[in-house]
């Protein structure tokens, strides 16, 4: 396993894909590890440099004496880019990792070409999910109850038995104090009023059935000046594993659209992506206009 010594700690990381591919750094949520992006490594790794890493105190990375904050994780990612000799990259965060991605875009804008937020939020306000985080914080302690939390979250993210086993085995290395402090950030952090300061293009991906997070999707889509919003049909919250192929297709088409020499209006590029993903639904360009605020379903 490769490790990078950055910011006084040791981070376990993996790189998949050709050196000429556009680099994408993936950020996992609390308790999960880089294994959450196993299908992104397999599928996107054919075209992009997929960079995954374990956040401090998770998986194979060293534990942290400092409490985890989104700012600290963002600094670690910059250190990882420096260690790898990468000047700039895309970044993609899943769930709480999506909030870290927003923080990184705001605090280190010169290092990120664009951002991808999957099932993420700029602040956590709904009672249901705040209670879930509150419970997770109390279960994240060095005891058997921590193992129950690991099994519950990894099972909820898995798509099959072998995936569950891999997610669980890696998460069992997590350090309770670091998992707890990472969870605690969800109850404190809020960057909603700063979203307009994000100047990079941002791709937003959510599950159609993840209705609790639809308001968060609309907040980001409204607040970020250059954002594209896609809902994946029949998908729930754990998009990176349970709806990997469709998520990866959207990312691939979106990144390619940004690299085109002749840029069209953003809504036209999004419509092109939608047409490629679902030609039956989005076959007629005249059915969509730049004034249409409805998200695109695929």
Image (cartoon, rainbow, N blue to C red):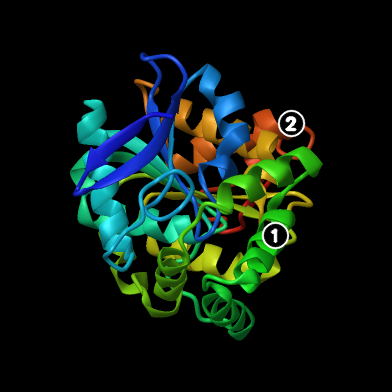
Q: Is residue 130 left or right of residue 70?
A: right
Quadrant of the rendered structure where residue 81 is? top left
Residue at the disc numbered 1 = 151
Quadrant of the rendered structure where residue 223 is? bottom left
Please determine whether, in this image, residue 293 is positioned above or below residue 272: below
Compare marks 2 and 1 and give the one earlier in the sequence: 1
Q: Nearer the viewer, residue 257 or 40?
A: 40
Q: Nearer the viewer, residue 160 or 252?
A: 160
Is residue 67 among the parts visible in the rendering?
yes
Horizontal and vertical percent position of residue 235: 74, 52
Q: Nearer the viewer's eye, disc 2 or disc 1? A: 1
Q: Residue at x 60, y 35 (%)?
A: 38
CA gap between label 2 and label 1 equals 39 Å
Q: Is residue 145 left or right of residue 209?
A: left
Residue at the disc numbered 2 = 279
Horizontal and vertical percent position of residue 263: 38, 29
Horizontal and vertical percent position of residue 80: 27, 38
Instruction: Mark 2 and mark 1 in contact? Answer it, CB < 8 Å.
Output: no
Q: Give the crowd class for mark 1: few <14, some 14-19, many >=20 residues within 10 Å.
A: some
Q: Secondary structure at mark 1?
A: helix
On-image quarter of the C terminus: top right
On-image quarter of the N terminus: top left
Q: Secondary structure at mark 2?
A: loop
Q: Nearer the viewer, residue 241 or 105?
A: 241
Q: Residue at x 70, y 60 (%)?
A: 151
Task: Report the disc number at residue 78.
Answer: none
Horizontal and vertical percent position of residue 86: 25, 28
Please determine whether, in this image, residue 180 is positioned above or below residue 253: below
Q: Give the crowd class for mark 2: few <14, some 14-19, many >=20 residues within 10 Å.
A: few
Q: Is residue 145 left or right of residue 252?
A: right
Is residue 198 among the parts visible in the rendering?
no
Q: Is residue 123 left or right of residue 236?
A: left
């Amino acid at each position: 396993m490769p490790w990078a010594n950055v910011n006084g700690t040791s981070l376990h990381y993996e790189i998949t894909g050709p050196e000429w591919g556009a680099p994408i750094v993936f950020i996992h949520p609390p308790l999960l590890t880089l294994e959450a992006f196993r299908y992104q490594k397999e599928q996107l790794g054919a075209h992009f440099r997929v960079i995954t890493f374990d956040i401090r105190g998770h998986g194979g990375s060293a534990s942290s004496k400092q409490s985890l904050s989104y700012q600290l994780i963002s600094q670690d990612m910059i250190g990882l880019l420096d260690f790898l000799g990468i000047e700039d990259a895309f970044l993609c965060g899943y769930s709480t990792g999506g909030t870290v991605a927003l923080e990184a875009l705001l605090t280190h804008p010169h290092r990120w070409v664009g951002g991808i937020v999957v099932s993420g939020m700029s602040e956590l306000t709904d009672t249901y999910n705040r209670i879930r985080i509150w419970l997770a914080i109390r279960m994240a302690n060095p005891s058997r109850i921590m193992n129950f939390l690991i099994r519950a979250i990894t099972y909820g993210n898995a798509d099959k038995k072998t995936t569950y086993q891999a997610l669980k085995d890696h998460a069992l290395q997590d350090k309770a104090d670091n998992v707890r402090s990472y969870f605690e950030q969800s109850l404190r952090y809020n960057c909603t009023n700063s979203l307009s300061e994000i100047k990079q293009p941002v791709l937003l991906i959510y599950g159609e059935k993840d209705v609790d997070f639809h308001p968060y999707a609309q907040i980001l889509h409204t607040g970020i000046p250059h954002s594209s919003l896609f809902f994946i049909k029949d998908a729930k919250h754990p998009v990176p594993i349970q709806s990997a192929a469709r998520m990866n297709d959207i990312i691939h088409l979106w990144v390619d659209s940004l690299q085109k020499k002749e840029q069209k209006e953003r809504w036209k590029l999004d419509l092109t992506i939608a047409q490629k993903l679902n030609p039956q639904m989005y076959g007629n360009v005249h059915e969509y206009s730049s004034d249409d605020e409805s998200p695109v379903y695929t």
